[in-house]
Image (tube, helix red, strand yellow):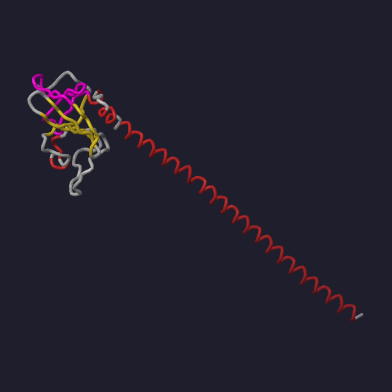
Amino acid sequence: MEKIFVKIKKYATVSVIFLGTLATLTACGSGSKESEKAEHTSLSQSIKNKESLPSSSSQSSSSDTSSSSISQNEATNSPQILAGDYSSLNGTWQTADGSTKIILNNGNIIFSPEYERIISNPVAKDGIVIADALNDKRHMGFMFAAAHNSPLFPNSSNVDKTDSGKDRLIITTDEEGIEIFDTMPTAFFYKVSNDTTSPNS
């Protein structure tokens, strides 16, 4: 009887150990599943974040394209001018300080009813449009830079001191080169209206 009791006790101990091990294994398995689930959730979130990046990039690219398109639209008058169509320049232009106004009307630069010059022979040079500004008495030069364009200076010490965010133009003497963008920024004209009827007297 005592031997039977010892065997039962031994069997019970083994069972308890087995059940304890099984419980531990189950808990580990469950913990592992929880860990896998958390990792899967984290991975899914990471993938979603990565997927959202191209969208954000795309929006940025779209914004860049939009800005680029605005710049290009503002600069569209350069090809027209080079083709001899000066209508995009039509209007009243004045210096930044408002001291001098001119009218441009289909290639005519009108300083006053008695004094005009005519734009001719436009060429693209050094990143801007350069042309002649002629009248019967004297040859002069004409330079036009579209908004967001600046001349390409041969000398690295020169900088564009004009308001490069706007279309601007200047009438020059034969001796003045593109350095005038640096040396005489206040002599440049900016368009203030589309009026072509009221030149300075």
- Check the image and report above or below for 103 versus 38: above
191 left or right of 115 in image: right
27 left or right of 55 in image: right
- Find the magenta span and give its range: 90-119
Q: Give the image location of residue 130, x and y in percent.
A: 20, 33
- Check the image and report above or below for 146 versus 157: above
Snapshot quadrant of residue 103: top left
- Check the image and report above or below for 91 versus 187: above
Snapshot quadrant of residue 172: top left
- Check the image and report above or below for 23 versus 141: below
Residue lying farthest to the right in this orientation = 1
Residue placed most toward the observer, 28 or 89: 89
The residue under the point 20% across, 28% down is 121
3 left or right of 101 in image: right
The residue under the point 33% across, 34% down is 72
Residue placed most toward the observer, 3 or 105: 105
Residue lying farthest to the front in this orientation = 121
The residue under the point 54% across, 49% down is 47
Q: Give the image location of residue 100, x and y in percent.
A: 11, 29
Residue lying farthest to the bottom in this orientation = 2
Q: Main secondary structure of the magenta part?
A: strand
The residue under the point 73% across, 65% down is 23
Residue placed most toward the observer, 64 or 72: 72
Q: Give the image location of residue 151, x and y in percent.
A: 22, 40
Q: Is residue 116 magenta?
A: yes
Number of on-image labels? 0
Q: Is residue 31 magenta?
A: no
Q: Please identify the quadrant where the C terminus is shown.
A: top left
Q: Give the image location of residue 52, x and y in percent.
A: 50, 45
Q: Please identify the quadrant where the N terminus is shown.
A: bottom right
